[in-house]
Amino acid sequence: MSTTSIQLPFFQGAGISKAGHKIALAIRDDDDFAVMIVHVLGVERLCASIGHQEAGAVLQEFFLELCAIARKNDTVERLGDRKFLVVLQGLRNRGHVSLAAQKIERIAAKCAATKLQTKPLKTSIGIVMFPEQREDESELMRLAEVASLDGLQKNESISFYEPQSAERLAIDWGLEDRLRRALESGDLDLHFQPQISCVTGDIIGAEALMRWNEPEIGAISPDVFIELAESTGQIAELTHFAIQQACRLLGKWQDSFPGFCVAVNVTPSTIQNMDIVDTIKSASSIWGVRPGALTIEVTENALMTDRDASHAVLTRIREFGARVSIDDFGTGYSSFAYLKQLPADELKIDRTFVMGMLTDESDRKIVEHSIGIAKSFGLSVVAEGVEDAESLDYLRKLKCDIAQGFFICKPLPADDFEAFCRKSAGMAEPAD
């Protein structure tokens, strides 16, 4: 990995995923390459030590350092607050890939230790090789995720995917049975991250985020249990639980907070099944929630898996009156022609671009273009990943509608979220 910069995606008639597009091309050309999922560990400890804003700066510095050491044909992409994707072209030797992974480990350690005099960051790096595993781009990324989780269990910082990894994870942790029991016992919970109007600063709703605190294991990442639910056929139950709980709480809050909207994320397989429409109708009826108070979030790439099926389902959802939001916009590869036809109410700009827009021209252009595209199609815009006042001010100047991020508030349990909203609105706590 030599020193060069990575060109971030730019709109040229379509939204392009750097990594997904690069992987798809390499598969088509039958090239050798490696896919890495890099999880940064101990972020909660880092936030507690130096604060969310400084911790965010460390993670952004780590991302920029990864971009700086990448070779011309390599790709680096930020998937979330603490997860990164690296695609290394032309490497079929595990030894060479291991050296690259070790370099990434050293970068993570340096970013925290030298800049903030704190303990070094640690990573869990999962790797899958092509053509060792001949799969499509989404499956290769999933297998790299499995390798990372397998490494965590074995206390190995670098782990290559092995076919038995996923099976061993499920057996050793017993997660399939534990998840089934959690659905029955209520161990799953929803946290809510507030969303505010960029114009007024008022809280207008929230994104619902599922959490699982397993009694014996402890907190289990949504990346783990949602993937598990998909692979074991429990995703429909998980989705039903999320929508029912969101509507139950909306029914409780709607008198105190009229106009509130709660967004629930759904997976690609869910959005291709008409059953979700019945789930939404049933939950809204049971809890007396107006349909427009519920937003269904689906990623841009999920819509490309089966266009006809997802289009039909989203159309039915909107006909009922619920809202549809396109999540992670700018990271996928849908065409503008398809976006124009899409039954949607809202675009949600991926946090990667929002977090980098004040320091990276490419990210700034993506945010500006995303807002312009949304407005031209009559859609509202949500910017997630708002980490500071400067970013919020800039989004206001761009006429962004809604903002979400740690600068506003971290995700909160339902009771804490309600208290936060009451305090923000100057309302008294309800009497017991």
Image (spheres, rainbow, N blue to C red):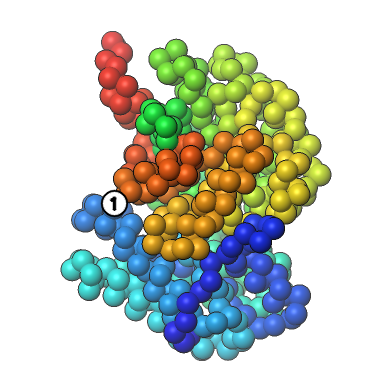
Locate residue 161 relative to residue 151 in the image: left or right: right
Q: In terms of depth relative to the viewer, which is nearer, 215 or 55?
A: 55
Query: Residue 25, percent across and down?
Result: 71, 73
Q: In terms of depth relative to the viewer, which is nearer, 293 or 355?
A: 355
Residue, x 43% and y 74% (percent of image)? 66
Mark count:
1
Residue, x 31% and y 13% (percent of image)? 430
Locate residue 21 relative to residue 394 in the image: left or right: right
Looking at the rendered structure, the secondary structure element under dot 1 is: helix
Query: Picture quarter containing residue 379?
Result: top right
In the rendered image of this protein, does residue 49 appear above or below residue 188? below
* Residue 389 visible, this angle: yes
In the rendered image of this protein, does residue 130 appear above or below residue 51? below
Residue, x 36% and y 36% (percent of image)? 412
Q: In terms of depth relative to the viewer, which is nearer, 122 or 155?
A: 122
Q: Which residue is mark 1?
A: 52
Query: Residue 18, percent across and down?
Result: 60, 66
Q: Residue furthest right?
A: 308
Quadrant location of the C terminus?
top left
Query: Picture quarter containing residue 64?
Result: bottom left
Q: Residue furthest top?
A: 431
* Residue 36 visible, this angle: no
Query: Residue 62, percent across and down?
Result: 37, 69
Amino acid bearing label 1: His
Q: In terms of depth relative to the viewer, which is nearer, 249 or 368?
A: 368
Binning the other alpha carbons within 10 Å of mark 1 as few (below 14), some (14 to 19) or many (20 upward) gives some
Query: Residue 302, percent across and down?
Result: 67, 50
Residue, x 53% and y 48% (percent of image)? 349
In the rendered image of this protein, does residue 373 appear above or below residue 315? below
